[in-house]
Image (tube, helix red, strand yellow):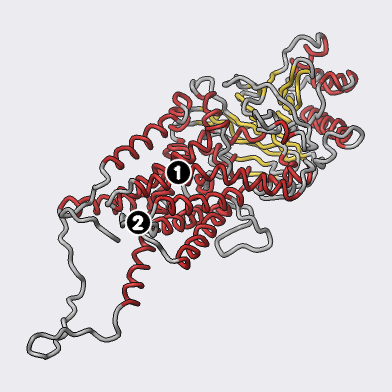
Amino acid sequence: MTRRPPGRGSRLAGLLFFFVCLLGGLGQAASLAWPLRDWAPPGFAPGQPSGGLQIASLALLVFALQFATRVGQAMWRGWVFGTAWLAGTFWWLFVSLHTYGGLPAWMAALAVFALAGALALYYAFAVGFLCAWAPLSRSAQALLFAGVWTIAELARGEFFTGFPWGAGGYAQVDLMAPWAPLVGVYGMGFLAAVLAYVLASLLTAVVHRVLAWLRQPVRPVGTRPTGGVYVTTPKTGLQLRSLSWWRLAGGVVSACVVAALLVSLLGGGERWRNLGQAKTASTGPLRVWLLQGNIPQDQKFVPGTGVAQALDWYPRQMLEGVAAAAAGQGPQLVVAPETALPLLPGQIDPAFWRGLLRPLAEQAGAQPVAVLTGLPLGSYEAGYTNSAWGITPAAARRALSDPQAGEVHRYDKHHLVPFGEFIPPLFRWFTQMMNIPLGDFARGELPQPPWIWAGQRIAPNICYEDLFGEEIAAAFESAENAPTVLVNLSNIGWFGDTVAIDQHLQISRLRALEFGRPMLRATNTGATAAIDHRGVVTHALPRLERGRLEATVEGRSGLTPYAEWASRWGLNPLWLVCGMLVLAIASLRNLGRRGGRTRRR
């Protein structure tokens, strides 16, 4: 990106920038949720995001790119950064592959590294394009970097079913919270990339000043004229450059834009913070119980242990909710996590269903309780889905009188997990090596109607479906029928007691901000939490403990700007804007040329 002729750098410099990119990638991974529980630097907290760290770590990559003299060199540095970032983000896949899947440790580690390395290619090609077509103007370079970086993030999130876990924008859930309902997570990542470029350019300027100072002779070097007397050329202070009005105006505009962006992050006033959700309004409170069974993952699908625990504890909590509601102090909704009932309905004794449905059906109070629970549906012969059932008192009565009535609200998971819920082509050999209950699940439709209960329109999503905001947005096309409450049912037990729990919580917080809706989380091992429409965690259970979370949330109606455009066009506006920006800047790559000479840093 120096616009210098290709040259051969020193091995020491190459090694130095390798470690700069490695450190930057690991910092990018830590920015989503600080991974160390026993120690955190000042200003950090275990499990919490850091928008500042995300920008600073990305700036390290830009700093390394600004010293790259060849496209291949830039791609290598981008790949090192991306691999370190992604491997450091979802290293916990090793737990599911090795601890629960039974793969040898070396093979599980290799699989995680291979996945990270493959996904890092998006970023390698992005920075390669940047360095091949870098304009001369610093402002244009900043926009080009943000554009290609955002395109790489979009590609990772959509191509080959998509796996955008750890996208940079999630680390900005606190620092850039007012931007979330306007531009979404990828737009926040674009803004962070611009700031990272500005920070890296300041660092580069400082480094060049220091190097220039170190290279100066201790004493001024004189020149010897014909008369034989040495003459020292006096210093003239700053060497002024002739600046055109166009460049001066461009610099002023760029500085103003960066300043405005910084002001928006550091405060911006109450009106700015509420701008994205100005068109949303309360739909009233909803009292909920969120259940966390904490059933060990290696026992969850084992008859006599995990299955028996699930079929005993979850229904008991639901019936306690019915009793509490009858006393006028209970919930309006009880939520159990993904596959809380770990068997197909036909595999469960009919007496179990009668014991659960009859108390629900016989409720006579003014504020009855309903149940939302995760379970697989279907049959081995006809296929099955990862689903959730919403059971109201009326639906329970009809189910008792006619089991085939089909009045229970049903949500079927749409975005399936590769290798866990469907097997990608050519990879069956890999899944056959693991001891995990795998299968080819059927996909649910998109969108699916919300479940209407207690004056709210409730939209469930399962597992990592809340990672795909554009798919949740499909239900927001009409403000009159849009969900008022989002509910995530998950089982992160596959990944043990790791930072995956904290990362998933931050992802759910950002979804709440984007749509201006509360997000309820019911999980097997954590994080079971209630998040309000501002992305604030109002109630939470400790991880890896059995219990129920009693909370009250406020449903919301109306649409945020993000919900409006994402529900109509998905992520296409971001693709279009970033693509046009990249093409425009690349076609004007001589922007900033002065007098026909190539500007160097």
Q: Which mark is residue 6?
A: 2
Q: Which mark is residue 210?
A: none
Position of residue 162 measured from the top left corner of the image (x, y, whole percent): 56, 34
Q: Is residue 307 visible?
A: yes
Q: Disc 1 on helix, strand or loop?
A: helix
Q: Are marks 2 and 1 in contact (CB under 8 Å)?
A: no
User: Residue 187 vs residue 102: left or right?
Assistant: left
Q: Quadrant of the N terminus?
A: bottom left
Q: Disc 2 on helix, strand or loop?
A: loop
Nearest the viewer among 60 and 32 is 60
At x 68%, y 39%, the residue is: 551
Nearest the viewer among 482 and 415 is 415
User: Residue 124 vs residue 163: left or right?
Assistant: left
Nearest the viewer among 54 and 103 is 103
Query: What amino acid type is highlighted by mark number 1?
Result: Phe
Position of residue 409 measured from the top left corner of the image (x, y, whole percent): 69, 18
- Separation (CA) of disc 2 from disc 1: 19 Å
Position of residue 402 measured from the top left corner of the image (x, y, whole percent): 81, 9
User: Residue 35 vs residue 209: left or right?
Assistant: right
Q: Hey, which residue is sitting farthest left in the picture? A: 227
At x 55%, y 61%, the residue is: 43
Nearest the viewer among 32 and 475 is 32
User: Residue 235 vs residue 297: left or right?
Assistant: left
At x 36%, y 62%, the residue is: 202
Query: What amino acid type is highlighted by mark number 2?
Result: Pro
Position of residue 46 measured from the top left corner of the image (x, y, whole percent): 64, 56
Which residue does the numbered mark 1 point to in the structure image?
125
Viewer-side label of 2, 1: 2
Instruction: Examine the image and state in which quarter residue 351 appears.
Output: top right
Is residue 285 positioned above or below 596 on the image?
above
